[in-house]
Image (cartoon, rainbow, N blue to C red):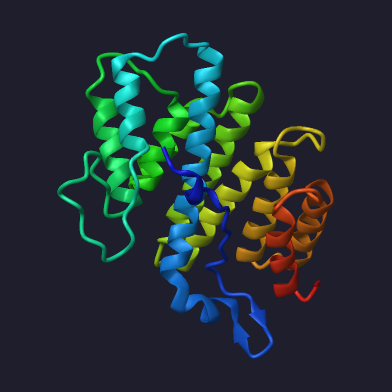
Amino acid sequence: MAKKEDKKPVGFDPKAVQVGGDSILERLVPHVKKIVIAIVITAAVLSVVFFFKWLKDRKLEKQTDGLAEVIDVGDRPVRVPGEAADPKDKQPSFADDKERANAVLETLGKQETPIASPGYKAGALLQAGRLDDAIAEYKKGQAEPGLDGVLAREGLGLALEAKAAGEKDPAARNKGYEDALAAFQAMQPDDKGARRDYALYHQGRLLIELGKLAEAKTALEKAKELGKDTALVELIDMRLVSLGAG
């Protein structure tokens, strides 16, 4: 599982949108690595939420050995880039989030029976860069009632968005963004429902990617209104400024 410091939400805008003399894409080119890392961090946050909700729903009185092993692997730290592993460390660290995610998946695969929610596994698959597998796993839970379904649809949108961002063909990339947008639109349709502000925020981001700026502004402003008491406001303001609506 990701540590507390890994949970800072970050957004990204990989598609070009003309603002002034330069496009947003041109301004983001030097930061492509950060853009990719952003979605991995978000996936980590979702996987942690899935995992703890699953534990609560199961009402486990005592952790099994297998569950404890998965927790141990997921809780190990990620080293600072360029830092060498300490051979004396009793709990070996990982070079990056992808390496840790693969270790979690390997540990899960050793268990005779499933011991974690599909959403937790999907989050690890997304962090490991196994996008098609993550999409398939998230789809299994998208029809679930309550928060489980909301989180699965959010994770599905993020996985589809990550896959689209890696497409070199503009038509394929836009198709992928449209699919991700549809997932976020289905994520939470109720204005009073859980994570409705995030659903609208994600929609706003994807609408910017697709060049639908007026619709993006409407979605972001509504997200800001619903999430006015959360850390999401700062991220929304950044998007609105890029649209000239700050």
- Height in image: 57 above or below 1? above
Q: Is residue 163 left or right of residue 220?
A: left
- The answer to which quarter of the image holds residue 89 is top left
Task: Confirm whether residue 58 shows in the render.
Answer: yes
Q: Residue at x 33, y 60 (%)?
A: 80
Q: Nearer the viewer, residue 169 or 69?
A: 69
Q: Position of residue 116 (x, y in %)?
A: 40, 23
Farthest-out residue, front: 88
Q: Residue at x 47, y 11 (%)?
A: 60
Q: Is residue 134 left or right of residue 56?
A: left
Q: Is residue 236 left or right of residue 121?
A: right
- The answer to which quarter of the image holds residue 149 is top right
Q: Residue at x 84, y 51 (%)?
A: 225
Quarter of the image that includes the C terminus: bottom right
Quarter of the image that includes the N terminus: top left
Q: Position of residue 83 (x, y in %)?
A: 26, 62
- Height in image: 7 above or below 246? above
Q: Position of residue 213 (x, y in %)?
A: 73, 67
Q: Is residue 131 left or right of residue 65?
A: right
- The answer to which quarter of the image holds residue 243 is bottom right
Q: Residue at x 57, y 74 (%)?
A: 16
